[in-house]
Amino acid sequence: MIDKVVILAAGLGNRIARATSTPKPFLTLDGSGEGETFVGWHIRQFAARGVKQIYVVGNQVTVKLPVPQPEGCTVTRVLNPTEDINTSGSGHSAWFAWQQEPAILDGRSRVVLMDADILYEPAVLDHLDAPARSSKTLVCAEYRESQEEVMVFGEGHLAKMHGKGLLGTSLVGGLTCVGEATGMLLWEPQDHARLREATDWCMRYSTAKVKSEHEDITQRMMLSGEVIATGFRDLLFMECDTPDEYAHLTSAFYPAVRARG
């Protein structure tokens, strides 16, 4: 079973912010302003699966917003204290999460790291927490030919590279596109020390430094041969980045997810 979940909710979602003053992770899924939020959905879904420890990483704005506290599950807020929100990426937020005491990456727990701005039907999580010997990146095997989404490329089940704009380029060599990244990763205990090292490296030496996204950290782990790609089909999954996508999510996608239970 999954032991801990870290939800990266420090982004404001500037593209959607033009249409609303609410930070994207705390937008309601039905558009009402009073219903379930992205963050709330994740907390309730993982708590229902028996996860006991959930961490929500927020900036100085989002860390103050209310989150559900399901019975039997401890939800802890983690502050990414960067004063200029625009200079901090999700990799930076992950780095602050790994500094928590007691340690999240303790070498014993199965730890999920995930973006907040996604919606999925609960059955998707069956593929995330299925037993495996290696850490995994969860991918949607049904994808659009898009240069705007993060695609995962690999050899068999082993993920070797991911990123935007790589489809149809020589940069991926003979690798196969195995799907669109969902922004959900499961880190097995044996990889915790290396993951901490990869995070530290990205924060100190990578070109983007504090602007690094958690995908930059995952790429370092892929280069070390630590990550497999696990895909799903015929299940509902959506990432939300723009006002148009949010309108579709509230009017059609969220009702479809709820209809599937």
Image (cartoon, rainbow, N blue to C red):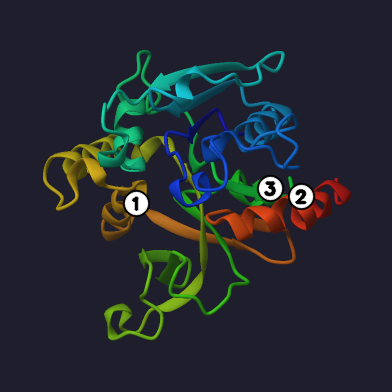
Residue kind at label 1, given as amino acid type: Thr
Residue 49: image location, x then y, percent: 71, 32
| For marks 2 and 3 on the same chain, the one whose residue lies earlier in the sequence | 3
**Residue at 29% across / 52% down in the picture?**
216
Image location of residue 127, percent across then percent down: 64, 52
Residue mark closest to the camera, 2 vs 3: 2
- Is 125 left or right of 164, judged from the image as shown? right
Q: In percent of the image, x 43 and y 28: which residue is there?
A: 57
Q: Residue furthest left?
A: 205
**Secondary structure of the residue carrying numbered label 3:** helix
Mark 1: which secondary structure? Answer: helix
**Residue closest to the far right:** 259
Q: What amino acid is found at the position of numbered circle 3 in the picture?
A: Asp
Q: Disc 1 marks which residue? A: 218
Task: Classify 10 Å Cα crowding around label 2: few (below 14), some (14-19), many (20 and above).
Answer: many
Badge 1 or badge 2: first in the primary sequence: 1
Q: What amino acid is at disc 2?
A: Tyr
Q: Quadrant of residue 227?
A: bottom left
Q: What residue is shown with label 3? A: 126
User: Residue 126, relative to residue 109: is it above or below?
Assistant: below
Q: Find the distance from the CA under tag 1 to the CA under tag 2.
A: 29 Å
- Which image quadrant is residue 211 in? top left
Could you tell me residue 248's position as x and y percent?
71, 58
SS class, disc 2:
helix
Q: Which residue is mark 2?
A: 254
Q: Nearer the viewer, residue 109 or 165?
A: 165
